Amino acid sequence: MAKRTDIEKILIIGSGPIIIGQACEFDYSGTQAVRALKNEGYKVVLINSNPATIMTDPEIADATYIEPLTPEYVEMVIEKERPQALLPTLGGQTALNLAVALAEKGILKKWGVELIGAKLESIHKAEDRKLFKETMIKAGLDLPKSGIAYNLDEAQNIAKMLGFPLIIRPSFTLAGSGSSIVYSQDEFIEAATNALDSSPISEILIEESVLGWKEFELEVMRDVRDNCVVICSIENFDSMGVHTGDSITVAPIQTLTDKEYQLMRDMAFKCIRAIGVETGGSNIQFAVHPKTGRMVVIEMNPRVSRSSALASKATGFPIAKIAAKLAVGYTLDEIPNDITKKTPASFEPTIDYCVVKIPRFAFEKFSKTNQTLNSQMKSVGEVMAIGRTFKESLQKALRGLEIGRAGLGADGKDNQPTLEDIKQKLRIPNCDRVFYIRYAFQQGLSISEIAELSSVDPWFIQQLEEIFRFEQTLLKAPFPLSKENLLEAKRNGFSDKQIAYLKNEKELEIRKLRKSLNVLPTYKVVDTCAGEFPAMTPYFYSTYEEEDEGEVEEGQKVIILGGGPNRIGQGIEFDYCCVHAVMALHEAGFRTIMVNCNPETVSTDYDISDRLYFEPLTFEDVMHIVEKEKPLGLIVQFGGQTPLNLTLPLEKAGVKILGTSPDSIDISEDRMRFGKLLEGLEILHPAYGIAKTIQEAKNVAQNIGYPVIVRPSYVLGGRGMKVVYDEEMLNQYVLSQMDHYTKQLGDHPILIDRFLNSAKEVDVDALSDGEDVYIGGILEHIEEAGIHSGDSACILPPKNLSKNEIQAIVEITKKLARKLEVRGLLNIQFAIQDKKVYVLEVNPRASRTVPFISKATGIPIAKIAARLMIGQTLKELKGIYHFDLLNYDFLTLKHIAVKEAVLPWVKFPGTDALLSPEMKSTGEVMGLDFNFASAFLKSQVASGTPVPLQGTILCSLRDQDKRQALPIINEFIQAGFKVVATEGTYRYFKDSGLIVECVKKISEGRPHVVDLIKNRQVQMVVNTPSQSERAQTDGSQIRGAAIQFQVPIFTTLSALKALNESILEIIRQKYRPEVQSLQDYFQVKN
Amino acid sequence: MENLTLKSNKKAILLLESGKSYLGESFGAQVERCGEVVFNTSMTGYQEILTDPSYKGQIIVMTEPHIGNVGVNKEDIECDQIFAEGLIVREISPVVSNWRAVSSLPDFLKKRDLPAISGIDTRSLTKHLREAGVMRGIISTLDFDPKSLMNKAQKSSAMVGQDLVREVSSKEKYDWDLSEWRWEGQKELPQLESHVIVMDFGAKQNILRCLRERGCKVTVVPAKTSKDEILSLRPDGVMLSNGPGDPASVTYAIETIGELINSIGSSKKNMFPIFGICLGHQLLGLALGGKTFKLKFGHRGANHPVKDLVTGKIEITTQNHGFCVDIESLANKEVELTHINLNDQTLEGMKHKHLPIFSVQYHPESSAGPHDSRYLFDRFIHLIQQSKKDRT
């Protein structure tokens, strides 16, 4: 079979904004697939609403649409581009659901678009619980016993039949959203109701519990000739009951015999054949009873997934790329194995190392939510580590996780939990369980006791016990340690930090000792074939063995440090910047070396850099690579806070940091030095102070005057940031900070700034070579200062700034860039209050807004920045990337770009859906059009907020907002909207002459305000919270209901104002949405 | 070479003919053995691999680092005796975790007097064997003197020219009556419909299981059984099993196979199919006039892609062979090529142009490994039924 020639143009749908359960792994897969198809000579059309993706870079696809992912917009793209085929398997559940909608609405038929990769019928069979079950039974596969219900009555009948505990899963939802495990009748009714609500077709599966069973996954591929292969087998450390996205997972499978594994492999092939996935990859999950070996199929995803991205990184087999080629008709034997070049892709990778993935959670940002892990995914990122053994990989993964741990404990960060605590934490799945297993050893629990409590396989527990036992050996060994002990420590994955802690020494002393004894890592290649064939691909991991395969190549090298695991505040945007840096430096003739440990990213695709080290981003691991490769220097400014935190130690160790000097970075991070700098330049800034004790905090706040904004020093994403209105709140805050950290404030003083009420906030990203300055863009925030810039909607070019204000912003930016001798990127946050321009923050590094600005303006500022960092000047670079040094491209744009944040409220029940100075969004979308109204509308639609052009608005406002809200609400009424309001708001509007209806508060009987939302009698909710935030009032219940029932909600007047403007304009001007590709916006042709 | 650290005092050493040596921790018997050092890339199935008689004369390196995790059980054995000479792994599991396990791997090895080393850089060893080719080596827990070890290794017999079949083949004829392992237990065995004689060159039991559960009465006969003895058992089909060593040295078997071919070719009345696996395939190739040669480092693992030249389908196969039938040598012979290895284009399967005789270089019975090639047993049964019809 050769590739199909009856297709010329293929449409690919991206996965949209980063949300929990759907992160940058789909940018990795999508980018690979688009490139593969282009290489085969196809024209590729791409639609994705997420601007922070590599796949939406204009040079990747032939026509790139940054448009909302809804059937309406996709149809517009289809109408314009007329693709013959749609490949729906690369954009996660979003793309798959969208493809189903397009097919069912007849849109694909209408325009003659063929679904390739997965047919509609197959998608239904895999996604629809009932069909899946029928299909599996027909294929002779065993499943957990179950029943399907469409209403509560049916659900209860099934529950009676099966008995508790039960698992409830709604059909067609993302990342197990709405799923739950119930143990009793009481819980059951609530859970079943929720699940019925969250399924778009009101269908739920109620299932025999397989809690505590061993969980496995196979990544399978199939081609048109029905050749099937397993790319990777994965075993979950956490047993059934914890979403696989939230489990620690291990590749390959460790606790199955060949007989059992082959049985599973047979079942997987039966499954993919029965579902009818003609070509491409699928992920199939199994549960195995630990005592009887009974094996059941749990679910299958007929598309590339988070697990397939992990499998690709774990084995070196690029699943998405191969899936794309299979979709256009190639067979596996016609595609060469990328890594060996000489052998075909029709084989099963075999690996000679152990891979461990650990999820990264962000519970600290959603403290009110229940942290028990269950079948609904809650993690926001993940780290992967490769080592020769599980012990080594596990400890590498733990130190790469960016939670302040240096491995499996023994790092000075351990707690002293009671035996009861330990047992509790072992029993109930939670994100710290692996550490509690170690505490259990300390308390003398046996392996079988721990296995009994936790349902973790004894093999894994034994491995942890060996780590713990070796920790004891190290404790007892005399210092300086022997070479044997050091080597054994390293082979067990211990970091220098852990060894230092155990021996009461400094990390650098351990390093010195190790070097003197020649205990150094060796680097091995990830080659898909366990060394059977020579590998051509430079993809390395460290271990402590005899032979080092990482022969150092000649050339001028630059190491780029990636961002580590995704978390809120540090995500795909930074990986985007890293990838751009790699590309730019490669283009400039340098050999690029990438270091990162996040398997979801494009940066860890071995095709991106000249050499990839899949390693934790710690001082120790990075130094080893630096010493081996001897690069010209390191780029730490693109990967967010993770690499930035390494700047000072690396510099101290004599490593050359490229670009802006570490000292300048320090000035901008150090509140005192920064304050002095601004004062010296006569730049306005809010009054500020630093406090190390409660008393100091009170004094500082007193001097500055309330409200103040408080935060711990050295954080990203506004972690722990808060607006404080009085001394009592301040007191509470300081206490909570002490609790969070080391029970004292000494090491982590609190920064206190004057809070600028009702100020406009502005973000600037600029480039500088120390001399010239290029302003990449000025982003005007829609939300006022006090809401984290990452959570705020933004407009580019700015809309409500005066010429003078823009001038002032430009001047200040230039002044600061020169003073800080910036070489590369510079991000500044401004606040404008009463026409005065204040500087809030300066970051001489890549910011979260860089990809957005690049997409909106067509100028790849991260690429230019990378070249500035290696010493080129803006004048020299002019012309290379089409930017005009003297005119700021963003001011001459004919179009408008609006960024909107996407928030994960729905995943964290119990958390109030409120914006604050602490960032909570997981992703962003972009609305792009020629007028503000349409661009804003698109940004809302793309972020999942269906903007109503008519209907009823529910208002519940705090007192100080009522006056300002009046004209806005009035305009809505004039435009034909109906308004209902809660008591106080109602009275104020009515007294002001508006025609509004009153709705009962919850305490006033039914139907009350929440009923209105539940019954979807309102199309939009406006609720601004009172300052105190202490009262769990109607407000939080209104917000909770709006989130749960997916009614658009606005919690700030500024956002409401923007929406109002946009809606009225659309109604008045009769704007109809249109789509245009980036290539057309910027007049570039590929 | 620098010594790596040891967790205990129980040391073991591996020394290769090339002069390279690896020091590790012993987890098997306290003995010394010589053998050809070969690597296997299968991630599962160490118990099946260890008990595969084809490893006679060989020391096995597993590329999968964690070995021993699932212990050993009663069912997953290919031969009641271990013929391999030693086992080399990166990390031996101190515990056993599997619902079927009855013993740990170290205990299993100690009982069978087999040396084993853990804690060495198996990847570097594998790459060395890939680059330099497989070679003789010695594994010892008793002698750590490189000179003396080298002496012993060089004195041990080389693989080329060795008939190892006579050391592993059963001494007596016997019948087999078990099916393949299944989760739900023994399959109810079908009625006996045909009689298959398995020439035991070191047969894996799973070949017998695959035949038995397809309705064959399975009679295993020693390798040196003559044509007449075989014919006297009134076979409906003959299976040429896998086995160890250099095929060219097993002259008696090549002769017998040649005679069997002549016999079934002589008249329809004498017709029955012959199916060769691995060494059986090589011996068949030699009997048909082909030649065999030694591969640099062999094929040993469970992920080798083989293409069926008739259907175009690809099967992922289990392989374990150091020798190979030379495709060129089969030109002008009564042979058609049926299967090819996609990694290195070597011969994987062939059939006789006119007679119901076919063979594969890989292991359709897998164990350890994928089940993709079981259809070959069905093909064999089909041929048996056909020739039965032809005979009557």
Image (cartoon, rainbow, N blue to C red):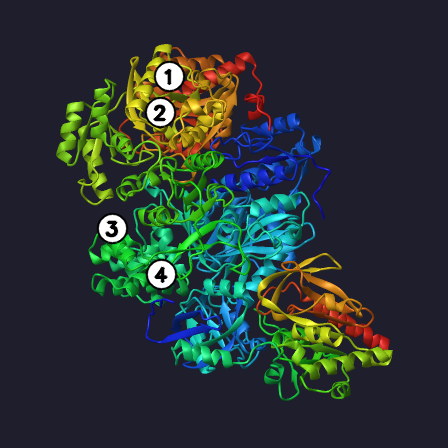
Residue tagged 3: A508
User: Viewer-proximal residue, A689 or B251?
Assistant: B251
Mark 1 vs 3: CB contact within 8 A:
no
- Viewed as shown, does residue A941 lie left or right of A844? right
Q: In terms of secondary structure, where does tag 2 sit?
A: loop
Q: Is residue A422 above or below residue B264?
A: above
Residue tagged 2: A1024
Label 3, label 2: how far apart the Cα atoms are: 52 Å
Q: Earlier in the sequence, mark 3 or mark 4?
A: 4
Instruction: Give the mark toward the camera: 4 or 2.
Output: 4
User: Viewer-proximal residue, A287 or A336?
Assistant: A336
Specify the label residue A965 is tagged with: 1
Q: Earlier in the sequence, mark 2 or mark 1?
A: 1
Looking at the rendered image, the quarter that the C terminus of chain B falls into is bottom right
Q: Position of residue B308 (x, y in %)?
A: 71, 60
Badge 4 amino acid: Arg
Q: Earlier in the sequence, mark 1 or mark 3?
A: 3
Disc 3 crowd rating (10 Å Cα; few below 14, some 14-19, many 20+) is some
Q: Position of residue B161 (x, y in %)?
A: 62, 79
Q: Earlier in the sequence, mark 4 or mark 2?
A: 4
Residue tagged 4: A491
Mark 2 vs 1: CB contact within 8 A:
yes
Instruction: Give the mark toward the camera: 3 or 4.
Output: 3
* Residue A902 in sight from this viewpoint: yes
- Viewed as shown, does residue A345 lie left or right of A554? right
Badge 3 amino acid: Leu
Mark 3 vs 2: CB contact within 8 A:
no
Label 4, label 2: how far apart the Cα atoms are: 56 Å
Instruction: Give the mark toward the camera: 3 or 2.
Output: 3
Disc 2 crowd rating (10 Å Cα; few below 14, some 14-19, many 20+) is many
Badge 1 amino acid: Ala
